[in-house]
Image (cartoon, helix red, strand yellow):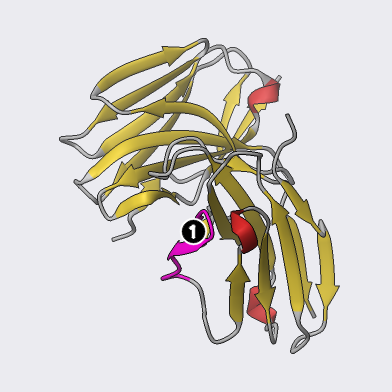
Amino acid sequence: EAGVVQSPRYKIIEKKQPVAFWCNPISGHNTLYWYRQNLGQGPELLIRYENEEAVDDSQLPKDRFSAERLKGVDSTLKIQPAELGDSAVYLCASSASFRGGGELFFGEGSRLTVL
Amino acid sequence: QKEVEQNSGPLSVPEGAIASLNCTYSDRGSQSFFWYRQYSGKSPELIMSIYSNGDKEDGRFTAQLNKASQYVSLLIRDSQPSDSATYLCAWAGGTSYGKLTFGQGTILTVHP
């Protein structure tokens, strides 16, 4: 069974440029998460989807971040414009349980460097 | 107070020793607790989950939960160099319903 797939693995951009990350969850997993992990810190939730509905986006900086999950499968996270402080690893995860929590399966992450 | 606090690291233990990792949480409504392991440059992977007070053993790993003290720990017996990683505790439920909230992680190094 294929795991969570993310792309790109690495991205280097200059500040004020846009960037987008893509995630394909494990087949059949209805819950999808985007986490951000800064160096030396634990992952912090940005947004959680149940199917195509964003049910928790309270930590998403909505002035510059946006996300979508079309048809309840793949998801895209966008940052526009990027700032220096956005440099981090963006992790996508999925889980089978609609209640969330439990076992999350993480992708390899997309490492963003903003110069 | 942070929602989840892990004992400060990094933690270094000799091969074969017991590594003890601790985590305290602030939300008494928390219901589920997890330990994830994250190798350098890799993504987190679940190694233990615990839902009830007491101990839960899985091979060399033992998770301990004390809801009254709001404390969860992970013991790794017979530590191996391959156990060297960052260990993240996480919880769900209460104010964290439907999601996992992670601690900042503890770096464990097992030296031969």
Asked whether residue B111 is in view, the answer is: no
Chain letter for mark 1, please.
A
Up the image or down, A20 lies above or below A100; here it is below
Considering the image in quadrants, where does the C terminus of chain B appear?
Answer: top right
Question: Is B96 or A48 nearer to us in this picture?
Answer: A48
- The range drawn in magenta is A47-59
Q: Position of residue B10 (x, y in %)?
A: 56, 42
Asked whether residue A19 is in view, the answer is: yes
Name the residue beneath numbered marker 1.
Answer: A48
Q: Position of residue B83 (x, y in %)?
A: 64, 25
Circle 1: residue type: Arg
Identify the residue at horizontal 23%, vertical 24% (top origin). Answer: B53
Residue A58 on the magenta span: yes
Identify the residue at horizontal 23%, vertical 50% (top origin). Answer: B27
Considering the image in quadrants, where does the N terminus of chain B appear?
Answer: bottom left
Q: Quadrant of residue A64?
A: bottom right
Q: Position of residue A42 (x, y in %)?
A: 53, 52
Q: Is residue A13 left or right of residue A34?
A: right
User: Is the stretch drawn in magenta largely helix, strand or loop?
Assistant: strand
Question: Is B73 or B58 nearer to us in this picture?
Answer: B58
